[in-house]
Amino acid sequence: MRVYIETYGCQMNDYDSRMIGSMLVGAGHTLVRGPSEADAVIVNTCSVRERAERRVLGRLRHLRGLMPDGAILGVVGCVAQRLGDRLPRAARGVDFVIGTDQYYRLPDALEGATRGNLRVEVEPCHDQSYDARPAPVEASICDFVSVMRGCDNYCSYCVVPYVRGRERSRPVGSILEEISSLVALGTRDVTLIGQNVNSYADGAVDFAGLLERADAVPGLGRIRFATSHPKDLSNRLIDAVRDIERVCEHVHLPVQSGADRVLEAMNRSYGREEYLALVRRVRERIEGAAITTDIIVGFPGESEDDFRATLSLMEEIRFDSAFMFRYSVREGTRAAALPDDVPEATKIARLETVIATQRRITEEVNRELEGTVREVLVEGPSEKNPALLFGRTRTAKAVVFGGPTDLAGSVVATTIEKASAWTLRGRLADDPAPS
Ligand code: SAH
Ligand code: SF4
Ligand code: F3S
């Protein structure tokens, strides 16, 4: 069959879609680039906020019209897991629904699927071991490798533990093999991903141990990781980031709120002062560390004072960048039992304020780089202006600059000439940097 896979949501879903793609290719199917040429369309969905979910449901209704008559429409991912057999009612015309722990059933589901003969598989997986290794098909200079699945943190607002199941770490050997095969195809920069990589454990190997082992893979240029939960970012891990040359000095450390009351109600297991102390520790130990974050505004009970506490925390820390969201009630979570009492207009106004604040801070932080020389891993031509090259600093900042396209995949020293909140404009520095 010709299969088109469409993906929404986070890096975990991007990764899973690749895994599904290589599994289906292995089973003799081919992947195509659009719904109109497909015998089967698979939509990998996100459920983290209501808007993400509504978007998917709208898209499902629309997709049917773009597909050839008789083509199969399947839904996988977090909305599939959450709604299960309620999904076909929300989006008519769906032929199968397969949850986040059941992807191994996909080749079979495709074979068996016929229009109008609905199949739903959303049993959570109780097996504690987890291993999934997509055979890489295409090389990209920066890529992701999943090291764990699920989440046990149960932040009160969050649907992820319900749709991704219990936390499971993947065996070290298999992770290293996947990194090696990506490197063989030309990947230079690997991001190890999981909802909370700090709690990675395979026997005696913790996440710092995994970083050490990944560092030993020949030919790999840079190692990154996301996401870290502040409650268990250990000194050992901070020191590993400092000491292992290939591990980039960037920590994504979602804070969510600057107010103790809200953090407590969110079940984040740390307070404002602890978070500030942790950031100080990261900055003391890792020179030049970039710190990025996630922020939610309008959580139930968030007062003006609580909101101002978030703003003051942002000013105090000066994050390099942030993902910012309006609180969205997720059915079945603990916070769903609380009154969603911040008016929508207030949520929107608060979101606009945090976005404007962070934009200014990002710009100020980036301006400090003007005139300095940074190591940039060249990814290829810039999408916006193909006459320029695009790359990233070790701290994950986007840089565009002029240079020959055969630099793709190498690390070059770049002088930062002009910084904005979005990009750094640079020029190749005269001396080549050690790669
Ligand atoms: N495991 C990661 C990321 C989880 S989802 C972590 O813990 O940081 C990414 C972000 O979405 C979260 O950090 C949070 O800021 C946001 N988010 C999750 N649930 C949300 C909800 N119900 N409403 C608004 N934002 C939410
Ligand atoms: Fe959600 Fe919290 Fe787990 Fe992140 S750590 S996925 S926010 S429950
Ligand atoms: Fe969305 Fe599922 Fe990721 S809910 S954010 S795709 S884990």
Image: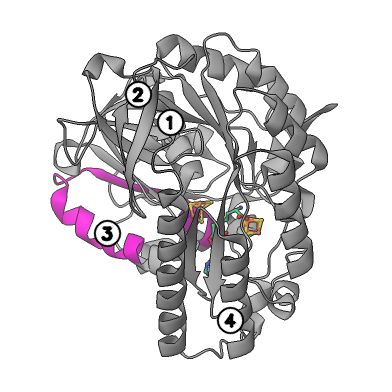
User: What amino acid type should be assigned to the residue bearing mark 1?
Assistant: Val
Q: Is residue 228 magenta?
A: no
Indicate the secondary structure of the residue bearing disc 2. Answer: loop
Indicate the secondary structure of the residue bearing disc 4. Answer: helix
User: What amino acid type should be assigned to the residue bearing mark 4?
Assistant: Phe
In this view, the residue in front, 204 or 351, is 351
Comes first in the chain, label 4 or label 3: 3
Query: Which label belongs to residue 373?
Result: 1
Q: Position of residue 387 (x, y in %)?
A: 14, 30
Q: Position of residue 81 (x, y in %)?
A: 53, 55
**Residue located 57% across and 32% down the image:** 248
Task: Report the residue marked by disc 2.
Answer: 429
* Span shown in magenta: 55-82
Figure label count: 4
Task: Report the residue marked by disc 3.
Answer: 59
Marks 2/4: CA distance?
A: 43 Å
Front disc: 2 or 3 = 2
Where does ligand 1 appear, by image quarter?
bottom right
Q: Is residue 77 magenta?
A: yes
Residue 65 lies in quadrant: bottom left
Front disc: 4 or 3 = 4
Marks 4/3: CA distance?
A: 34 Å
Front disc: 1 or 4 = 1
Query: Which label belongs to residue 307?
Result: 4
Do callouts 2 and 3 mark residues in contact (Cβ within 8 Å)? no
Marks 2/1: CA distance?
A: 7 Å
Do callouts 4 and 3 mark residues in contact (Cβ within 8 Å)? no
Indicate the secondary structure of the residue bearing disc 1. Answer: strand
Does mark 4 have its CB less than 8 Å from ligand 1? Answer: no
